[in-house]
Image (cartoon, rainbow, N blue to C red):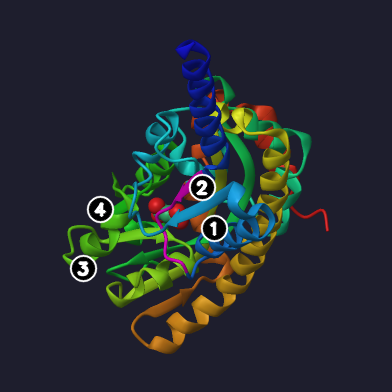
Amino acid sequence: MQRPIITLLTLGLLLASALAAAAEPIVIKFSHVVAENTPKGQMANRFKDLVAERLGDRATVEVYPNSQLFGDDKVLEAMLLGDVQLAAPALSKFSRYTDVLALYDLPFLFEDLDAVDRFQQSEQGRTMLESMRKRGLLGLGYLHNGLKQLSSSKPLRVPADASGLKFRIMSSEVLEAQFEALDAAPLKKPFSEVFTLLQTKAIDGQENTWSNIYSKKFYEVQPYITESNHGLLDYMVVTSTEFWMDLPDEVRETLAVALEEAIAHGNQVARDKAVEDKERITESGRTQIIALTPDERLQWVETMKPVWQQFEDEIGADLIEAAYAANGSD
Ligand code: SIN
């Protein structure tokens, strides 16, 4: 008569461990490389708060800023291994997984963030979020930072001024070609190393947004910033397809809505910071901001734009045309 007791005990234990497992919160690690006072930092923190508010103990978001957990060179591999669940690398950093996102690196493609919005919300723009699905990665949305400026150890007014200088770039073939078109030397380096590379003069310059130049103090070690607005720094919020599809439906839906709201917040921060951080840098007096004349700007456009043709086959001429057509339809 011992058997039923053992069976009941076993069942009880199994039930208890199943209940304990069910009560475990879903942990979502969100790794990024920028400071908290940036569009991406603010978006990630807002997402964490919204998830806490709406999912309580069912899911919890842990945010790791400033490359604390992974740099962008490692984060996507880590995501596929299940070590991190969310990230938002710059669109320039997906080249190992897809060709089409290189579109966003083409110099002078978008005039402003309104044009970027129009393209990203179009069918073609939204389809690009799915471009890495076969590789196990799913884009959940785009997030803005802003247009890039050129910072340097010497004044850059015309493209010839950049000749022979070393510039740090993100890991993108388009950005490499862009600096080669200037007869400059591009070096692919992680974001976390840029300040030291500039400070020690191992490189002469870099390209980035006002927000990143301010929050990472690049302006303290670069005497000149040319307001070129020559390229875009935008992000894709990305997850592992397996992780996302395995979530209970109602959790996935709540997360998707919270993410949309957090992105809208981050996009507003991006627009505000492009103005405020530029002002802070100007007021610091640590660097000289160079405004280009229309003629000088045209020289940058004419030197950099031929890069488009080099990547036309890889990206697709139709896609480039559609993105460019998003300009000026206000
Ligand atoms: C970022 O904004 O996430 C980093 C951009 C960079 O690597 O320059």
What is the spatial separation of the Cα atoms under label 1 and label 3, in whole angstroms?
Answer: 29 Å
Label 2 sits on residue: 88
Chain part drawn in magenta: 27-36
C-alpha distance separating marks 4 and 3: 19 Å
Mark 1 neighbour class, 10 Å CA radius: few under 14, some 14 to 19, many 20 or more: many
Query: Does label 2 or label 3 sit earlier along the sequence?
Result: 2
Give percent across and percent down for residue 81: 40, 29
Q: Measure how far apart labels 1 and 4 are at the Cα level.
A: 38 Å
Q: Mark 3 points at which residue?
A: 199
Nearest-to-viewer mark from 1 and 4? 1
Residue 299 shows in the view: yes
Q: Is residue 112 visible?
A: no
The reply to whether discs 4 and 3 touch (Cβ–Cβ < 8 Å) is no
Amino acid carrying label 1: it is: Ala
Q: Looking at the image, tell me whether mark 2 or mark 1 is earlier in sequence order.
A: 1
Query: Eyeballing the image, is 174 above or below 220?
Result: above
